[in-house]
Image (cartoon, rainbow, N blue to C red):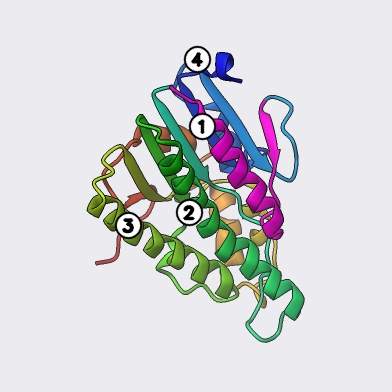
Amino acid sequence: MQSADREIDSLIWISGATEGIGLGLARNVPHAAARIVNLSRRPHPDYESVFLDLADPASWEDVGAHFAAALAHFRGSRAIFIQNAHMKGITGFVGEVPPDAYARDITANVAAPLRLGEMFLRAVRESGFAGEAGLVMMSSSSARSPTIGQTVYCAGKAALEMWVRVARRELAMRERRNIWVTAVRPGFVDTPLTRQVAAMADSDYPIASQMRKQMEEGVGVMDIDTAARQIWAALPTDRSLLLFGEQVRR
């Protein structure tokens, strides 16, 4: 482990690197000599994989242990964690969807990202890693737009962005200048999750038909590799939020 680490200059974890934006981020990593680790329920044939089930807190602890073990003897230039994974959660009107599914959605898509982000920052601090340490929390325009049928998704992304803002201030107060934290709104990206919600009935998800139309016309829609290259090109950053493919409402 230690001898292998000497040959690795970049240590990069990406949750959900089996498909969608996570896959695009994994196969477009711009750093040479990178160890790329997929955190997912499914292993990836091309990348080292560690099991992560966003709905299972026990698996979060295993990922936290992996962060700590990998960083303990790492002497490369950078360590980056991109929290990208999102469980295909419940879509529908509040109070009308199955309660167990709703609770699971909250666990997986609100609690899990924040806990995983905290575990990574804790592992960086406790390991004494002195290189560049970066945390990317994948967000969405839903953090600012109250999308009908997506109470958990919108609340989760809004909470994630506020978490990033507070974490950045705390890191600045502790003068941990080697650590950067940012949230990313990637814009409209053609992913399996996007296609899943676009296929829903408008009665459950009123903007589904609008999404289908946009995807059919291809206007403002990015493929996963284009989106990934844009994100990597913007990192590292001193901004709390990176926006792609959307206008900021003042």
Chain-order first, disc 1 or disc 3: 1
Using residue 108 as the reference point, say whether residue 143 is left or right of it.
left
Chain-order first, disc 4 or disc 3: 4
**Range shown magenta:** 47-75
**1 and 3 marks in contact (CB < 8 Å):** no
**2 and 4 marks in contact (CB < 8 Å):** no
Question: Toward the viewer: 165 or 58?
Answer: 58
Q: CA distance from mark 4 to mark 3?
A: 43 Å
Residue 170, compared with residue 136, is above or below; it is: below
> Residue 109: within the magenta?
no
Using residue 41 as the reference point, say whether residue 235 is left or right of it.
left
> Residue 50: within the magenta?
yes
Amino acid on which the number 1 mark rests in the picture: Ala
Which residue matches tag 4? 6
Chain-order first, disc 2 or disc 4: 4
Which residue matches tag 1? 72
Mark 3 element type: loop
Mark 4 element type: loop
Residue 229, compared with residue 116, is above or below; it is: above
Q: CA distance from mark 2 to mark 3?
A: 29 Å
Q: CA distance from mark 1 to mark 4?
A: 12 Å
Chain-order first, disc 2 or disc 3: 2
Q: Locate residue 109, reporting x and y percent.
A: 59, 62
